[in-house]
Image (cartoon, helix red, strand yellow):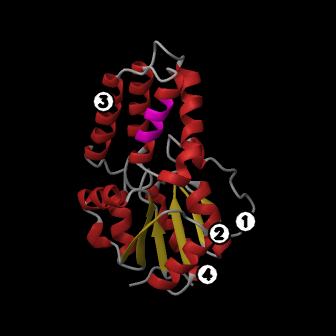
Amino acid sequence: MLTTIGFDADDTLWQNESFFRLTQDRFATLLADHAAPDHLAERLEAAERRNIGHYGFGVKGFTLSMIETAIEVTEGRVPAAVIGELIAAGREMLEHPIELLPAARTTVTALAAEYRVVLITKGDLLDQERKLAQSGLGDLFHGVEIVSHKTSDAYHQIFARHGTGADQAMMVGNSLKSDVIPALEAGSWGVHIPHGLTWALEAADPPLGHRRFHALTSLAALPDLVESLTGTRKG
């Protein structure tokens, strides 16, 4: 039985990583006199890995990691104007309008009429609340969970709170590491819908052969998958 469907937000329902890539390109331009783009990208990724436990996921942690990297690669000589540019870039990311991905609204609308649908996302609380409000999808969800980390225990608790347990739930998202694998570990179905861009810290191997793992090429195909798993449409 399937009663509950969880949706990731960033790069599953709306664009996110593309804005990070554009800002990272701007970062590389600002530091072009001090480090080659590839080297700078490696240093930034290392800083993000170090800082994720302190700052969490999202734009604010990314901005602080850019500033830290700028200080490192310039050996403390980074101009104040560059720091100001990086702060401004982070602020622009936090103010960027939402861009829904294809079929996001129609898919969530269709499944919300038949199942409990829950938004499960991680990142900065204020930023995620802002994006959900701008998306126009908020009223479709039976529950919203903004968490620090997506783990099997988190999915157990969320699907018990908003549904009938993890074994009767499905998690849908673009990240194998955060959306799919821990949901499978919790006993749920895990549906991977790849995005064209994936953050290095979210990389993982697909759990091929797991009986509850499914991969789709688009969100539009999700209702048909759900129907094939349940054998019938409700309502």
- Looking at the rendered structure, the secondary structure element under dot 3 is helix
Disc 4 marks which residue? 167
Residue 227 can be seen in this image? yes
Q: Residues within 10 Å of mark 1 (few under 14, many from 20)?
A: few
The three-letter amino acid code for the residue at tag 3 is Gly
Question: Which comes sooner in the sequence, label 3 or label 4?
Answer: 3
Q: State the CA–CA distance, disc 1 to disc 3.
A: 48 Å
Q: State the CA–CA distance, disc 3 to disc 4.
A: 49 Å
Mark 4 in CB contact with mark 2 (< 8 angstroms): no
Q: Which residues are magenta?
A: 63-69
Question: Which comes sooner in the sequence, label 4 or label 1?
Answer: 4
Question: Which comes sooner in the sequence, label 4 or label 2?
Answer: 4
Mark 3 in CB contact with mark 2 (< 8 angstroms): no
- Looking at the rendered structure, the secondary structure element under dot 1 is loop
Q: Nearer the viewer, residue 101 or 98?
A: 98
Can you name the residue that lies furthest to the top here?
33
Disc 2 marks which residue? 184
The three-letter amino acid code for the residue at tag 4 is Asp
Disc 3 marks which residue? 84
Q: Position of residue 153 (x, y in %)?
A: 60, 74
